[in-house]
Image: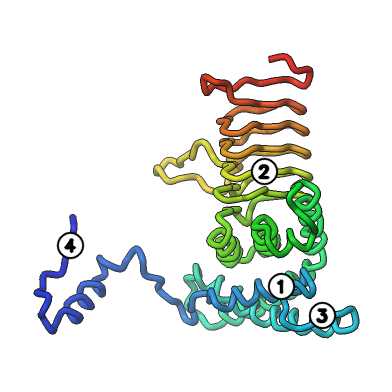
Amino acid sequence: MKRRVQVAMHDENIIQAVVNELCRPESYQVVYHRPTLEGVMPSLEVLTEVVERLRMVLFPAYFSDSEVTPATMPYITGSHLERVERLLAEQIRRGFGFSCEKTDRASCIECEDRSKALSRRFIATVPEIRRMLATDVMAAYEGDPAAKSTSETIFCYPSIKAMTNFRIAHELYLLGVEIIPRIITEMAHSATGIDVHPGATIGERFFIDHGTGTVIGETCEIGRNVRLYQGVTLGAKSFPKDEAGRLVKGIPRHPIVEDDVIIYSGTTILGRVRIGRGSVIGGNVWLDHDVEPFTTVLQSETSSNVILCSNGKA
């Protein structure tokens, strides 16, 4: 039932009336973050700085206002990483506080120490993040005839921006950091239209051409040298419930895409199905079953799917 504050537009007490309404427990109980001890929310502004500083480290001289040469690179890289480590540790601590229900100060000190340790462990993964991103850059350059250089893909391609955020967030996800990984991937989602859950597993040389509207779910497993086009959904088909009727979370429910697969625009693949190595899935196809390796799946004129095997027989 709709509930509106009944006041006249000229009523000088309208602010107080609205405040009273908004501060009713029935109004805020679902949307209120109740802090415990130092339960301040993570900062979007600070996390944006963290990601942008990491982007400058991962792609030297591309996103920096300062000139970066091999001689100055160690100092500039070290400066960025030192600040990232400090900022990230605080944001990780806030992330733990996001769902914390403890009320003793000793627990807060424990979280502070844990957050600092996790931030240091994340910093140790940055070389591997760069290695993976370098393969993504090459996949974009080699896979798109419109790409004039690797520099163009780094600067301009939404896939590289989204994958940079994803690969940062995925390492944090693997470390058990709470909420921060999801915030980081949603930053890229807002900027590029590419929605990749930080829990997904994605191999090297991954490329999403154009990218807008692509969705990759939490438990997706994607091999190496996979290419997607815009509007592809790798989603879940059904959501099992427990005896109380609540959704069972954390179970594998998204597709497995093996190496060297191409999936064209507008295709939807749902459920824990396996797309075999070397397969090609045509545009606007709906799939909810396994596909054997080296198979081509196309949409027929009647909107049902026709599977063409490697020998070309329907």
Q: CA distance from mark 4 to mark 1?
A: 46 Å
Front residue of 171 and 210: 210
Q: CA distance from mark 2 to mark 4?
A: 46 Å
Q: Residue at x 16, y 65 (%)?
A: 4
- SS for dot 2: strand
- Disc 1: which residue: 54
- Disc 2: which residue: 228
Q: Label 3 amino acid?
A: Val
Q: Earlier in the sequence, mark 1 or mark 2?
A: 1
Height in image: 138 above or below 24? above
Q: Residue at x 40, y 44 (%)?
A: 244
Considering every residue shown, the one lying at the far right of the view is 71
- Disc 4: which residue: 3
Label 3 or label 4, whichever lies nearer to me, is 3
Front residue of 262 and 17: 262
Q: Residue at x 20, y 75 (%)?
A: 18
Locate residue 184, reporting x and y percent: 60, 65
Q: CA distance from mark 3 to mark 2?
A: 33 Å
* The quadrant where residue 155 appears: bottom right
The answer to whether residue 199 is seen in the rendering is: yes
Crowding near pointer 4: few (<14 within 10 Å), some, many (20+)?
A: few
Crowding near pointer 3: few (<14 within 10 Å), some, many (20+)?
A: some
Quarter placement of the C terminus? top right
Label 1 or label 3, whichever lies nearer to me, is 3
Query: Residue 68 got which mark?
Result: 3
